[in-house]
Image: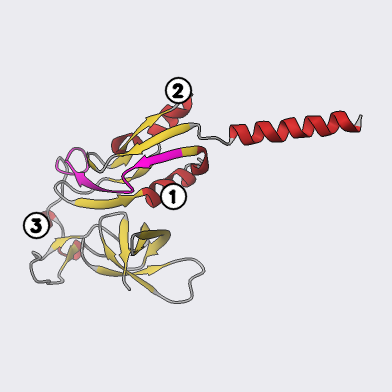
Amino acid sequence: MKTILTTLCALLLFSGFASASPTATIVVHPNATVSGDSFVLSDIATVTSADTAFRIALMSTPMGRCPLAGLTRPFNEGNITLKLRQAGIDPSTLSISGATSLLITGGGGAGTSGGLTTASALPLASQSVTSKPGVASPTAIVVHPGDRLTLVYDDDGMTISADVTAESAGAVGDTINLRRDGAIHPLQGIVQDAETVKMVE
């Protein structure tokens, strides 16, 4: 009886290791043009899987907000795995290849060029009055206090991402104050777009 139980346990363990092999392949594109309010995995990568339902679910995984028309946003493999985890998908069950970082360009559409709010159309209180060399002022505020953002830190090609909350408003290029649960020291980041800030060193 003990031998039978041992054999069954071994078979279960073996089948567990076998099922741990990648169930889908994601090939990340080096560049992508997106439009609308947000983009999904299929906008920036090619997804293949023998499981059609799983492939469709992966393809429709939200990745973030689209940049405004004509603006660009950096995105990398770390951002992809973070968004997959947030969607309840274990990245270790996937094979991710292709570009390790890509540039996303806003191509217009709903929420961007079609409904793009220009600085002149914004109320004065919603405009940034910070003057910077080479940057037209005022510019449209894209981040507001209380917005949930992704803080990105890049060190010699290694990128670390973390969820933070904006404590001040800012336009693209502005430095704003941030809050992260459990962090002792205050954080600051440079606004990349409505969803991403780059950590100030």
Residue with the mark numbered 3 = 120
Which of marks 2 and 1 precedes in the sequence? Answer: 2
What's under tag 1, amino acid-wise? Leu
What's under tag 3, amino acid-wise? Ser
Q: Image height check: is 84 above or below 151? A: above
What is the distance, in whole Å, between disc 2 and disc 3 at their CAs?
47 Å
Q: Residues within 10 Å of mark 2 (few under 14, many from 20)?
A: few
* Figure quadrant of the C terminus: bottom left
Its colouring scheme is: secondary structure
Q: Residue at x 39, y 36 (%)?
A: 26
Dot 3 lies on which element?
A: helix
Which of marks 3 and 2 precedes in the sequence? Answer: 2
Dot 2 lies on which element?
A: helix
* Mark 1–mark 3 CB contact (< 8 Å): no
Q: Provide residue 15's location: percent of width, then percent of height.
A: 66, 31
Residue with the mark numbered 1 = 82
Residue 50, numbered circle? none
Which of marks 3 and 1 precedes in the sequence? Answer: 1
The part of the chain drawn in magenta is 95-113
What is the distance, in whole Å, between disc 1 and disc 3 at their CAs?
36 Å
